[in-house]
Image (spheres, rainbow, N blue to C red):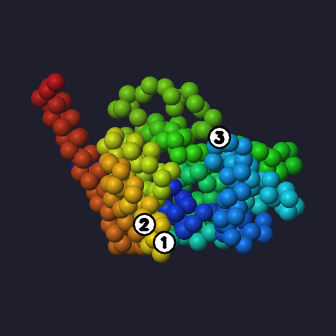
């Protein structure tokens, strides 16, 4: 039994693939803030009931204008070059893709993040993702960011799991992503999907996949007691995550072994399903 099938792994970014928030490596220091918390506190001063993601995107532009910084796609991509990654992330994607290939599984990687897409696009790992779903800006004819364009928050994150599930990666296409598609005709079934995240904004995605037969893995920065406590709190909140690990993606680490085991299980489940279908066809079971 060796027929090929597709498997998707979706990742949060901040705190999952990289320590801290992506804006804290270059963008916020360029604004003159010695302590990033001062910037994040400023985002809370937006009008009441403002979406948190819209608030931070608006504040990025507002503070940059005060400092005379021209925010363009290239500027934001340059901010992504200095982002530090967790151990093993730089070799993770080709390694896991190759492991799937040996199992005759086509593994694709996706980002689903409330962070800034243009910054992620500037990182050394951007080329490994089939699609980066993240918050972004609208640009004028001169290439200047003028307003938040896409704002992804913790609840809207789940729509992107459905986009991957149905193969609707064009974010402007809302008709197909909301259309009814029988489970057997969806591009990547939920039980062949894995979500890796670290915080409260990932809980809806954890729940969607776990409840649909997929896998959810929570990771934490072992150098941060707060990060560990947050993940433990998530895990104690019911059927949310399958596994919890330190964010170490090096070969033979617990995360590495766990994801490979999840792929092994998917291979076995797919083979069993195909055997059942052949038996049904041969003996005309109904």
Give the side of residue 166 with respect to residue 150, left or right.
left
Mark 2 or mark 3, which has the lower sequence index? 3
Residue designated by label 1: 224
Q: Which mark is residue 29?
A: none
- Residue 228 — which label? 2
Secondary structure under badge 2?
helix
| Residue 273 visible within the image | yes
User: Measuring 24% from the left and 47% from the top, which residue is drawn there?
Assistant: 269
> Percent position (x, y) of residue 103?
31, 57
Taking the image as drawn, is residue 11 in sight? no
Whether the residues at callouts 2 and 1 have beta carbons within 8 Å, the answer is: yes
Instruction: From this view, report whether residue 258 is shown above or below residue 48.
Output: below
| Residues at marks 2 and 3 touching, judged by CB atoms closer than 8 Å | no
Query: How many neighbours does mark 1 have within 10 angstroms: few (below 14), some (14-19), or many (20 or more)?
Result: few
Whether 90 is drawn above or below 130: the answer is below
Residue located 48% across and 56% down the image: 199
- Identify the image quadrant of residue 180: top left
Location of residue 173 in the rendering, given as x and y in whole percent from the top left corner: 59, 32
Residue to which mark 3 is pinned: 49
Residue drawn at x 74%, y 55% is: 60
Q: Secondary structure at mark 1?
A: loop
Q: CA distance from mark 2 to mark 1?
A: 7 Å
Left or right: residue 156 versus residue 218 is right
Say above or below: 245 vs 51.
Answer: below
Q: Position of residue 57 (x, y in %)?
A: 70, 51
């Amino acid at each position: 039994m060796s027929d090929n099938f597709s498997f998707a792994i979706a990742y949060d970014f901040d705190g999952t693939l990289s320590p801290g928030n992506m804006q804290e490596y270059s963008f916020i220091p360029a604004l003159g803030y010695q302590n990033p918390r001062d910037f994040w506190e400023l985002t809370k001063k937006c009008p009441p009931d403002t979406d948190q993601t819209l608030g931070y995107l608006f504040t990025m532009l507002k503070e940059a204008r005060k400092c005379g910084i021209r925010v363009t796609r290239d500027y934001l991509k340059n901010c992504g070059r200095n982002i530090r990654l967790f151990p093993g992330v730089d070799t993770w994607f080709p390694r896991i893709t190759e492991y799937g290939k040996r199992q005759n599984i086509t593994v694709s990687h996706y980002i689903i993040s409330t962070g800034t897409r243009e910054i992620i696009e500037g990182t050394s790992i951007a080329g490994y993702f089939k699609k980066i779903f993240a918050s972004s800006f609208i640009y004028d004819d001169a290439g200047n960011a003028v307003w938040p364009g896409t704002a992804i928050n913790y609840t809207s994150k789940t729509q992107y799991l459905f986009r991957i599930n149905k193969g609707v990666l064009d974010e402007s296409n809302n008709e197909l992503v909301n259309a009814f598609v029988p489970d057997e005709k969806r591009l990547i079934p939920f039980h062949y999907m894995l979500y890796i995240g670290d915080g409260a904004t990932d809980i809806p995605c954890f729940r969607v996949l776990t409840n649909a037969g997929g896998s959810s893995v929570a990771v934490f920065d072992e150098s941060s007691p707060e990060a560990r406590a947050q993940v433990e709190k998530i895990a104690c909140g019911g059927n949310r995550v399958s596994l919890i690990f330190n964010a170490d993606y090096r070969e033979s680490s617990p995360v590495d072994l766990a994801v490979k085991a999840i792929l092994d299980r998917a291979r076995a489940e797919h083979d069993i399903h195909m055997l059942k279908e052949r038996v049904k066809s041969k003996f005309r079971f109904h």
